Image: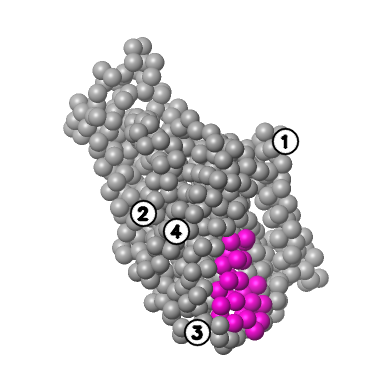
Amino acid sequence: MRLAALLLLLSPLPALAAGGAGPLDLTASGTGLLALAVFVLAYLLVMSEEFTGLRKSKPILLAAGVIWTLIALAYHGTGDHHVVEQALRASFLEYAELMLFLLVAMTYINTMEDRCVFAALRSWLVQRDFNLRSIFWITGLLGFFISPVADNLTTALLMCAVVLAVGGDDRRYVSLSCISIVVAVNAGGAFSPFGDITTLMVWQKETVHFTEFFHLLLPSLINWLIPAAVMSRFVPRELSQGRAELVGLRRGARRVILLFLLTILTAVAMHQYLDLPPFFGMVTGLGYLQLLSFYLRRSALPDLRQLDGNMEPPPTIDMRRHAFDVFETLSRAEWDTLLFFYGVIMCVGGLGFMGYLDHLSHFIYGGLGATTANVVVGVLSAVIDNIPVMYAVLGMNPDMPLGQWLLVTLTAGVGGSLLSIGSAAGVALMGQARGCYTFFSHLRWMPVIALGYAASILAHLWINQRLF
């Protein structure tokens, strides 16, 4: 009770518009400053996950609860507390739509992994007699074109596994290839709504329409090609010594791939022609996968047709070769990422409700101009995760033409490549290629990556100048 009373005293209640017509401006109050400090502290813990081992969702979830509690206390007794509830529900609705979309996409990716789609691709690449420089280019190119459909984290892990298999003990080669892969998957994810969470947010907000993202294809390609061309000069042409066990596709693998593409088409068509939110089409596509799972189980073997869904198959039958449990693959979704995403949206939504995003928008976009501000957003994405940065920009909703919205989509997507900790792909590969790909090995090539970053921006400003 003492804490609540103290927070009420700190709140600028006179700032409430007459008649309770608008929200309070809490930016200069003790409540607002305390909420901001809580968010900064939580995000420092998120950024130090690699060193502390504390999963990133834990501090940000707690921060979200504290921030909205502070807001509710500030409005307590004003007669306008329902405004807080409405704002909270609006932020949660945004999260729920994105979460369902991502959950379906993750389920399909996990199912393709279960059906050995990625393992078969990795085995095929390793079995071929490519030299090291060819593998360097192939993994980067595949990373660039797979990440727009699959998520960039999964794509990076797949390509890194190939590099580790062929690179052996050549730490320099593994490091250079991992850098190329990180840049490639981040660049590839920037020109597709399905390639990154930030592009998905922009698409679901209807700030940029589906087909308009493809204006970023050439700038994104340039972002990867320039650093890759420079780094390839330091990659030897010697033949790969790697060998891998031949892996075949499990039953239903090709049908899962086709259903995933059909699910994407369903989401796009429903959004473009029926004005339904994208998550609705994705969840419909989850139904496709569930029916396939049922069919594969019932048609696998005569012995399995008689099994009830709750019964275990005989020990002589390798169930995983014949069918899959869609709910098992659903449970393997990246829940830490999904909960982190919830915390970010609720935290930034709360700070925006307090008035911070309006002030930040006037300071950045009003003071620096749209182009400079959007370039800075990309640089910030290298230090701070691009999810809260992009969500904050969408919350500010600056008045910008399509070309500028595409620019901030590009910079937020590829800016994380400047540092190894700037993207989920970079952090994951530091763990997968531990000892070879490190923060400092990536930092050594940052000037070259920054050159690609600058070139991609200039390419967008020139190629898409009619959109500004």
- Residue 313 covered by magenta stretch: no
Q: Mark 1 to mark 3: distance in Å?
A: 50 Å
Mark closest to the chain's N terminus, 4 or 3: 3
Q: Name the residue under label 2.
A: 383
Frontmost residue, 466 versus 78:
466
Residue for point 38% across, 31% down: 366
Instruction: For marks 1 and 2, give the one nearer the viewer.
Output: 2
Q: How crowded is mark 1: few (under 14 residues within 10 Å), some or many (20 or more)?
A: few
In percent of width and height, residue 196 lies at 54, 52
- Circle 2 sits in a helix, a strand or a loop, which is it? helix
Residue under the image location 74 percent in, 58 percent down: 258
Task: Determine whether label 4 and label 3 are within 8 Å by CB.
Answer: no
Task: Give the magenta range.
Answer: 121-146
Residue where numbered disc 1 is placed: 273
Look at discs 4 and 3 and give the one toward the viewer.
4
Numbered mark located on residue 451 in the image? 4
Disc 4 versus disc 1: nearer the observer: 4
Q: What residue type is labelled 4?
A: Leu
Q: N-terminal of the two: label 3 or label 2?
A: 3
Element type at marker 4? helix
Residue indicated by mark 3: 168
* Quadrant location of the C terminus in the rendered image: top right
Secondary structure category for the residue under label 1: helix
Between 5 and 103, the residue placed more toward the observer is 103
